[in-house]
């Protein structure tokens, strides 16, 4: 993109819990860019009207639950990756006034995997819990890895079958969660654990050598991450993916590197 955004916003509902304003404002300060990033809590009925006025005003930003698919439908142009995932989490208005949608969740997930495993995996099977937008981003990442495939388990099996059909070269639905637990990398792409201490998979089932990535983030880590780590697994929660998708979005909007150190420090410090 070439035009600097007039404003930066996060569109979601609810957004009160979001850390994005904290680390995006830290990145803006570190880069000396005189803009504020603000969260907009949008009633679904207000979404279309709000997006129309953001386009008129040349605003850029992020999109979170529950609007990532709606934003994809609303965009005038999609990057190939956001079209592949079927969800937009980054948007901006280009020089021709077109609303452009992108997806940095895939890059965020790749970075989180590298942080967990030291490198992108080759020739492994990934066990994916969930079949929504987050799971689609995981499968788009797996599709780009060398010699890897995925098993997908979901509470609603039809959604798993539907998602795997979109990623048929790498993904297969399974109806036994034990298959997921035996994968070399186990990923929670459901929202289980976001609001309470529920766990997406019994920690005792996870195979001894498996690494675990929970895409859910909660202050102090999720109970599931703590439980599987206590059993000796390498395990991270969703904070790394969250910050990296934000850093990638920042770099798309401004064309300058995002100060990841400042972003991490801002959330460790409890927010600005
Ligand atoms: P996102 O875009 O964050 O992936 P989503 O599309 O609403 O959000 O998907 C949420 C995922 O979490 C789905 O896989 C959902 O399962 P269903 O397809 O059966 O709804 C899963 N999920 C949410 N709550 C769950 C629960 N209590 N137990 C198991 N899976 C759950």
Image (cartoon, helix red, strand yellow):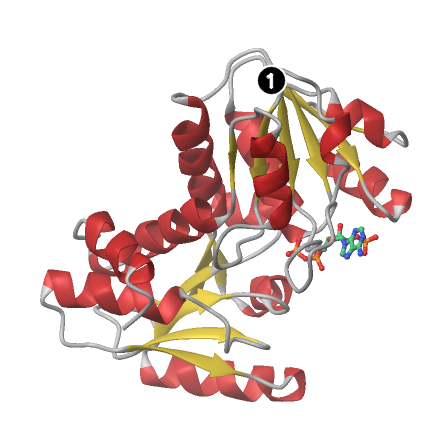
Q: Is residue 11 above or below residue 161?
A: below
- Residue found at x 50% / y 72%: 17
On the image, the x and y values in percent for residue 75 come to: 52, 66
Q: Is residue 255 above or below residue 120?
A: below
Residue found farthest to the front: 230
On the image, the x and y values in percent for residue 216 come to: 58, 51
- Residue found at x 89% / y 43%: 157
On the image, the x and y values in percent for residue 233 come to: 57, 25
- Residue found at x 42% / y 64%: 91
For the C terminus, the quadrant is bottom left
Camera-side residue: 132 or 103?
Answer: 132
Q: Quadrant of residue 108?
A: top left
**Quadrant assignment for ligand 1:** bottom right
Q: Quadrant of residue 160?
A: top right
Residue found farthest to the left: 32
Camera-side residue: 113 or 143?
Answer: 113
Q: Is residue 23 above or below residue 132?
A: below
Q: Would you say 168 lies left or right of 3 here?
A: right
Camera-side residue: 115 or 156?
Answer: 115
- Whether residue 104 is visible here, answered yes or no, is no
Q: Which residue is mark 1?
A: 148
Q: Would you say 31 lies left or right of 178 here?
A: left
Instruction: Count the numbered circles shown.
Output: 1
- Residue found at x 63% / y 62%: 69
- Whether residue 152 is visible here, answered yes or no, is yes
For the residue labelled by badge 1, is the local secondary structure a helix, a strand or a loop? loop
Camera-side residue: 11 or 222?
Answer: 222
Q: Would you say 116 lies left or right of 189 here?
A: left
On the image, the x and y values in percent for residue 38 come to: 36, 79
């Amino acid at each position: 993109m070439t035009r600097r955004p007039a404003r930066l916003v996060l569109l979601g509902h609810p957004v009160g819990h979001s850390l994005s304003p904290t680390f995006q404002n830290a990145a803006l300060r570190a880069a000396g860019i005189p803009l504020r990033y603000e969260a907009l809590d949008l009633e679904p009925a207000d979404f279309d009207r709000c997006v129309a006025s953001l386009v008129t005003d040349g605003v850029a930003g992020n999109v979170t639950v529950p609007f990532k698919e709606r934003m994809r439908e609303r965009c005038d142009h999609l990057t190939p990756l956001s079209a592949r995932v079927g969800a937009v989490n980054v948007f901006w208005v280009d020089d021709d006034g077109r609303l452009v949608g992108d997806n940095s969740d895939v890059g965020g997930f790749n970075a989180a995997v590298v942080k967990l495993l030291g490198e992108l995996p080759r020739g492994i099977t990934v066990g994916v819990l969930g079949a929504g937008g987050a799971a689609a981003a995981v499968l788009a990442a797996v599709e780009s890895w060398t010699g890897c495939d995925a098993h997908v388990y979901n509470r609603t099996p039809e959604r798993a079958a539907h998602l795997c059909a979109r990623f048929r070269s790498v993904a297969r639905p399974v109806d036994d969660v034990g298959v997921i637990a035996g994968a070399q990398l186990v990923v929670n792409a459901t929202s289980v654990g976001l609001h309470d201490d529920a766990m997406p998979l019994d920690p005792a089932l996870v195979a001894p050598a498996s690494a675990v990535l929970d895409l859910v983030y909660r202050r102090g880590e999720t109970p599931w991450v703590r439980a599987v780590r206590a059993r000796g697994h390498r395990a991270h929660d969703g904070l790394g993916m969250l910050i990296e998708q934000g850093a990638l979005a920042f770099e798309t909007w401004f064309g300058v590197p995002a100060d990841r150190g400042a972003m991490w420090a801002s959330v460790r410090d409890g927010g600005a």
